Image (cartoon, rainbow, N blue to C red):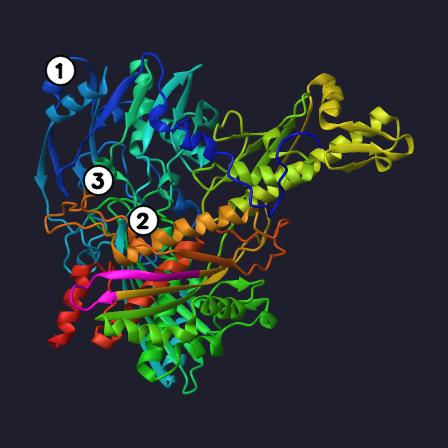
Amino acid sequence: MSGGMRFGIGARASRVEDQRFITGKGHFGDDVTVPGELFAEIVHAEVPAGRIEEIDIEAAAAMPGVFAVFTAADLKADGVGVIPCTGLRARPLERADGSVVEAPPRHALADGAVRYVGEPVAMVVAESRAAARDAAEAVMVTIEDRPHAADLMMAAAEGAPAVWDDAPDNTVFVKNVGDHEAVDAALSGSAHISRVRLPFQRLAMSPMEPRTAHGSIEDGRYVLRCGTQAPHAAGRVLAEILGVSTEGVRLVTGDMGGAFGMRSAVFPEMVLVLWAARKLGRPVKWTGTRSAHFLTDDMGRDMVMEAELGLDADGNFTALKVRNTAAVGAYLSMQGPLPAFVNLGGLAGVYRTPVISAAVRGVYTNTVPTAPYRGAGRPEAIACIELAIDEAARQFGFDRFALRQRNMIKPADMPFQTGLAYKYDCGDFPAAMAKVLDLADIAALEARRSDAAARGKLLGFGLCMAIESTAGFLDESASIAMAPGGRAVLGMGSANHGQGHETAMRQVVGETLGLPLDAIDYAMGDTDEIAHGSGTFGSRSAIFGGSAALEAARALVAKGLAQAAALFGVEPADVRFDDGLFYQDSSNRSLSWAELAAEASGGEGLSAEARWSSEDASTYPNGAHVVEVEIDRETGAAVLTRYEAVSDAGTLLNPMIVEGQIHGGVVQGLGQVFSEAMVYDASGQPVSASFMDYAMPRADDLCNIGVAHASVPTAKNPIGAKGAGEAGTVGALGAGLAAVADALAPAGVREILMPASPGRVWEAIEAARNGK
């Protein structure tokens, strides 16, 4: 083996991609620039609902440097289609009357009416960004205001203003899962019923880099350069909207400052820059701002879950009944309805609850659409069952840890069919719980609580047993080309937006091919270079992408063995491969990859590709999370003092990367618990419009986040991986809420607060103190 660092699966290899990021050599959306490009600026609606009476573009069109000002009429004249809700195609939904839900038309520019503050109304294209912004301010939009419903529960109430005329009660869909009759019967016979109500506030997804879109026409084809989690899927949807074949759109995605689910959709600006580039004959670039992000980008969560957990006299769970009311916004984003119901199997948690049911109602609101956000319903489902268990323990005198142990699925029970949807294949949940409680020093908890009380603090200890379903659908591709010089090019269909693919996938193929990481080049994100890809979402890349990469590497080794046998003049069975070399032992000869590739295909090298899928690919990463928090009785301020997590993500491609993913997910979960909230005022205007008033967690808001592993590899894929990208959020939300509830219970506070900001906590403590 010559030169380079050699790391395989399971090694703590430093991330290859970090070198360019920390030295300023990344290539992000706004870094894309070409000669002759024009700049686009969007005019947004300033009211949450109303009929467009007039769009006066005359003054803007006459301003210096302005090439054009476009409205919906221009798009319609060219036959530009609407942005579809592709999620409905895969999972059709029904209204209460049984009719099939059809997504309302979402035009790239508002057509006749606006339905949320920030909806795109017109587009200005000019020679410079400054000229485009000046002209956008000169576009005069006259709108006849209509009544609106920006708040979820207000929109869900009887008599609320209708966002769409064909949904007078704002109900988009209803969905029932589980056996409702069996659940009702079990609850009626239960000795105890624990009830919780969990309002999961709306969140801005807040990637480090705002969205961008750069459109051009190259060789007669549309070419879009932007950040997206699923280049191939986005390209297909854009082709449909623009009325061309799939081959008529090329999509190129580079570095991204995070995605979190938001970048899995096609947004209006992506359509607009492509259409304008063809219309004007020059490339068109749009760069979003942080302010625009709060107005226009899909958002997360925004649902209210109510749960009833039944128990018998001994504390055995009998049934769980859940009602979920979920906002979809004014339109259905591409996957918008899914978080409300697609991961409800997580309500089972890690427990043997015999029967579970859930009733879901999707509701239109005069707001930006919602979309899958890190976890996409998983954190909410887990928080629901975990908080219901804690409430049962408080209300009926059970020990909350013993209550969990009594009802927990044991390793000997595997495989285990839960009371709702999921069938777990493996895992050791009791071991994870025991390990995290030991790491959190549970033995000294009451001493710490007493010490906090002496200092005027309320100490809360929250435990969350997390589990989720990952990687349940689609397939993934990988290709490897070995050049005559002995360098391999790994092409992946799953796009990297911060997860460490460039390192972890090199580890997968490097181990199989016997190559150091620096002998492997990485390609992704260009639909011309990568023939197929499903994308990066749902914690699927290690499973689907890793398995495809492993299969491609194995296929390349098989080709290499055949090529080496031909060169040695022997049968393939007489050649062995080890550590990057092909050996023919009887003649004591060997060939390296470089030598083999130089002889293969007329000197063009060797290549192999693979797609990996499975009829039952779903895996169930799980773990146990503990949060400890101190809350000041007099100010309501919370300070995190302890965080421990034990994770079972199966086989770890790179433990260091997995731990980083868990850290990031934990912070996002805690952000929802303590500080983040997208707020609209009574007039439907977003009050959260910048990081001055949208409180993202900061480093000094956190404590050390401990992560330990208790991996049980799955047999559902050749690597044994279970997925880890969303695991931190799935555990942190429930653990953080449980800690706050535990801290506030002695003060008489029973309401679940999100976010538990100092002001809200202080008000809750004062209300309980005054008996309100």
Q: Main secondary structure of the magenta part?
A: strand
Determine whether, in the image, residue 430 is placed left or right of residue 197.
right
Q: Which residues fall within the magenta stretch?
A: 631-644
Mark 1 is surrounded, within 10 Å at the Cα level, by few (under 14), some (14 to 19) or many (20 or more) other residues, namely some
Residue depicted at 57% across the width and 47% down the height? 653
Helix, strand or loop status at disc 3: helix
Q: Amino acid at mark 1?
A: Met
Q: Quadrant of residue 412?
A: bottom right
Q: Amino acid at mark 3?
A: Leu
Q: Is residue 175 visible?
A: no
Helix, strand or loop status at disc 1: loop
Q: Amino acid at mark 2?
A: Ala
The picture places residue 179, in percent across and down from the top left corner, at 43, 70
Rendered image: mark on residue 252: none
Rendered image: mark on residue 295: 3
Residue corresponding to mark 1: 63
Whether the residues at callouts 1 and 3 have beta carbons within 8 Å, the answer is no
Residue depicted at 38% across the width and 84% down the height? 190
Query: Quick one: quadrant of the N terminus?
Result: top right
Q: Quadrant of residue 348?
A: bottom left
